[in-house]
Each structure stands twice: as structure tokens, then as C-alpha cells.
Amino acid sequence: MPIIKSAIKRAKQTAVRRERNVATKRALKDAIKAFTAAPSATTLSAAQSAIDTAVKKNVLNKNTASRRKALLAKNAKAAAQAKPTAAKKAAPKAAAKKPAAKKPAAK
């Protein structure tokens, strides 16, 4: 533990800043994990917002943030393209079923 008064103050400031940085990083990781689990427009927006917040607070470098945002957008685009093809495959199967033919009534 520091003895000099200014060093004591510096240690306290460092501890407070570390707590803030850890909270920002945790929010960033949570947002990215949420996007990875369920890629959608809302989770993409939240993840990109968390990245921008981390840059604003000097927790993340701007070039690193740009790279991560580009990767998220790429993954979102791939997920969006994968979903419609699955829906198209399922639709013809449902439309292929025809109603049973009615028997003619006997007189």
C-alpha cells in the first residue's frame, strides 16, 4: 500500500476507473453474446451501441471497434440470408398437401 498522500489518491482513482471499465466491458460482452445467440436487427443495434459506448469511454480502440462492428454486420447479413431459404423450403411442403376428394353422394 502506498504511503505518500498523492499515491494513495492515485490508487483510489485507479480502483474506481477499473470498476467502470470492467462494467463497460461486461456490458459489451453481454450484448455481443446476445447477438450471437439470436441474430436480429435489435440485437445487432444493441451490440453496435455497446461497442460505440466502449469507444466513447476509451475502453476500446476505435479501429478494434470498427473491425468488430463489421464482423457483426457480416454475421447479421449471413443470418438474414439463411433464414429466408429455410422458410422457402418449408412453404412448399405445407402447400403440397391437397384436401381429400369428396365421394359422390349415392341416390
Image: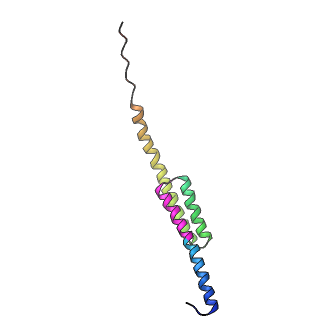
How many callouts does the rendering have?
0
Task: Name which residue lies at 54% across and 62% down.
Answer: 69
Give residue 3's position: percent from left, percent from top: 59, 93
Q: Residue furthest bottom?
A: 3
Give residue 47's position: percent from left, percent from top: 55, 61
- Image check: 19 left or right of 93? right
Task: Name which residue lies at 60% across and 77% down.
Answer: 17
Q: Is residue 42 within the magenta segment?
A: no
Residue 95 sits above or below residue 83 on the image = above
Task: Name which residue lies at 59% across and 81% down.
Answer: 14
Q: Residue furthest top?
A: 107
Task: Name which residue lies at 54% across and 69% down.
Answer: 25
Residue 63 sits above or below residue 107 on the image = below
Give residue 18's position: percent from left, percent from top: 56, 77
- Image check: 46 left or right of 75? right
Applied colour scheme: rainbow
Quadrant where the image shows the C terminus? top left
Q: Nearer the viewer, residue 103 or 95?
A: 103
Q: Nearer the viewer, residue 91 or 42?
A: 42
Quadrant where the image shows the N terminus? bottom right
Give residue 56's position: percent from left, percent from top: 62, 69
Residues rendered magenta in the picture:
23-39
Q: Main secondary structure of the magenta part?
A: helix
Residue 75 sits above or below residue 87 on the image = below
Q: Identify the image quadrant of residue 6.
A: bottom right
Q: Identify the image quadrant of residue 16.
A: bottom right
Q: Is residue 30 within the magenta segment?
A: yes
